[in-house]
């Protein structure tokens, strides 16, 4: 169990995928450039390559954790995390209707 205060530290936001490409040399990673309603897009790496084609992700909106510490993977920096349901394959979480990039989840 975590406290509400700990949960409130998470910054969950809607992001729009501007571009997506496979990370060369990785069996798992796709590099996403995501509009989170900020001055410039963020690079976020997602381990969904096995199940999703990058071109099918472009233009879609998903839910991201926006305030994780940056993490290096395969020589690239990831600045957030795509949230996904853990089913037989990861199912990225998305809003039921289009909203502005950067919309906060509460």
Image (cartoon, helix red, strand yellow):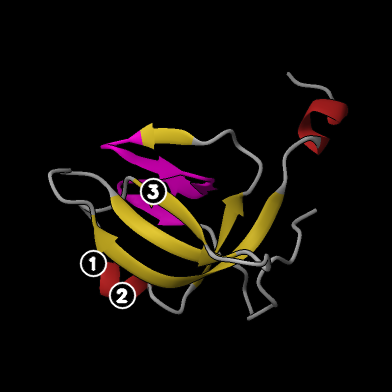
**Quarter holding residue 28:** top left
Vertical relation: 43 (above or below) 5: below
In space, the residues marked 3 and 1 are separated at their CA atoms by 14 Å
Specify whether 96 is left or right of 51: right
Instruction: Between residue 91 and residue 54, name the one nearer to us.
Output: 54
**Number of on-image labels:** 3
Q: Give neighbour class at mark 3: few <14, some 14-19, many 20+ (Cα, 10 Å).
A: many
Circle 3 — which element? strand
Q: Give neighbour class at mark 2: few <14, some 14-19, many 20+ (Cα, 10 Å).
A: few
**Residue found at the far top of this picture:** 1
Residue 81 position, x and y percent, is 51, 45
**Which residue was labeled with disc 1?**
53
**Which residue was labeled with disc 3?**
45
Q: Which residues are magenta?
A: 73-92
> In the rendered structure, does residue 84 fall within the stretch colored magenta?
yes
**Which residue was labeled with disc 2?**
56
For image coordinates 59% across by 66% down, the residue present is: 40
Circle 2 — which element? helix
Specify whether 21 is left or right of 58: left
Specify the principal SS of the magenta part. strand
Labels 2 and 1 touching (C-beta < 8 A) = yes
In space, the residues marked 2 and 1 are separated at their CA atoms by 6 Å
For image coordinates 50% across by 64% down, the residue present is: 34
For image coordinates 63% across by 64% down, the residue present is: 36
Residue 8 position, x and y percent, is 82, 37
**Quarter holding residue 68:** top right
């Amino acid at each position: 169990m975590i406290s509400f205060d700990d949960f409130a530290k998470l910054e969950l936001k809607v992001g729009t995928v501007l571009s997506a490409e496979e990370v060369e040399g990785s069996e798992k990673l796709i590099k996403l450039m995501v509009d989170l309603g900020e001055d410039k897009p963020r690079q976020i790496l997602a381990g969904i390559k096995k199940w999703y084609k990058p071109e099918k992700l472009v233009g879609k909106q998903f839910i991201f954790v926006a305030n994780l510490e940056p993490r290096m993977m395969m020589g690239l920096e990831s600045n957030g995390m795509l949230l996904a349901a853990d089913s037989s394959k990861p199912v990225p979480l998305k809003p039921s209707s289009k909203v502005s990039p950067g919309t906060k989840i509460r």
